Image (cartoon, rainbow, N blue to C red):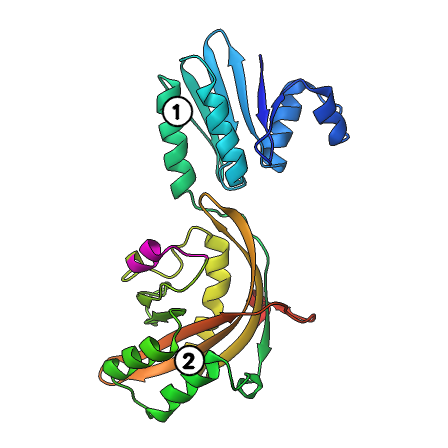
Amino acid sequence: MTGILVDAAGELWPDTSPTLQAAFRAKLPTPEFCKFCVLNLGFAHIGKSRNGLALSWRPTTLTGATFAGLMMALSDERQARVSIATLAEDWAYELVPSIDAARRRLIHVFNTATCEQEGHYLARRRRVESLRSGDHLPRLLNALEMAGDQVTPLTVWSVLEKLGNGRYVLVKPDQGKPSLPVVTWGSGYKRYTPDWALRKTGQAFEEQPDRAYARFASVGYREAFHRGETVVEDVATSTWWPGRGRTRFTYTRLLVPLNIAGRGTYVLSSSQDIALVEPGLKLAHEVG
């Protein structure tokens, strides 16, 4: 079987290319080299035989450029059956009757996949007093504190509308539930699409495309809730999104427990981007 490798930049290579092997200082049989590229380098592979095409890929490591190259490579092939091997936590296999069906299937998987592979998530706790007075986070916190020990829902929405910058998440922790139900999710976060944020209402905070990121990020919510104290932290993280791959973010996050009159305790999160996080961060899952 001979075929095509699609690299991280979307370029196409013969899967027998000695130049490509030399670039990675590899000397492997073609099947082993192709598997290595798919598992470790974020490539996609299209193998060819008399019986059709055999495609292997790992959607959670593919870049948008690789996916575009894969779609173009398939468009250049004559119609044939396609065997698709998809690696998530384990390999899954399916057979589709045509290239058009394969393209539709790949697009659906690429746009809806969830990532279990951990990126990095580092957080450094800060004193509340260290927030810069001109930023939106201390202004948001001051407005909530001025509302008193109990706030009304109307007060919360009014403050968020004026000072939240669209970057807020409100959850309602429940001692009897392992997940964090989302009450509202602002549409101002660059790494989430507005449609996705709107659909999060009523869902668990942990149900995000990047499951590892969601697990780490939920720690601060639980600490603020259980301690009844405001938490401020600088975060450096990488998050994965379907169709975009993994992107690095640095931000300051404010987590405030709110006693909403007649409704119990909620936790509000709001954040703002920062250009650089200082050294000495602790792993978020090692904090508190």
Residue at image location 45% in from the left, 66% down from the top: 218
List the residue tagged with mark 2: 256
Secondary structure beneath dot 1 equals helix
**Does any portion of residue 228 appear in the rendered image?**
no
Q: Residue furthest left?
A: 262
Residue at image location 63% in from the left, 31% down from the top: 37
In the image, taking residue 58 as reference, residue 194 lies left or right, namely left
Q: Position of residue 281 (x, y in %)?
A: 65, 70
Vertical position of residue 233 compared to residue 148: above or below: above
Over which residues does the magenta segment extend?
A: 191-198
- In front: 153, or 100? 100
The residue mark sitting in front, 1 or 2, is: 1
Q: Position of residue 41 (x, y in %)?
A: 62, 36
- Specify few, some or many for label 1: CA neighbours under 10 Å numbering under 14, 14-19, or 20 or more: many
The quadrant holding residue 195 is bottom left
State whether the magenta stretch is mostly helix, strand or loop: helix
List the residue tagged with mark 1: 102
Residue at image location 47% in from the left, 31% down from the top: 86
Q: Position of residue 130 (x, y in %)?
A: 58, 85
The mark nearer the N terminus, 1 or 2, is 1
Secondary structure beneath dot 2 equals strand
If the image is split into quadrants, where does the N terminus sit?
Answer: top right
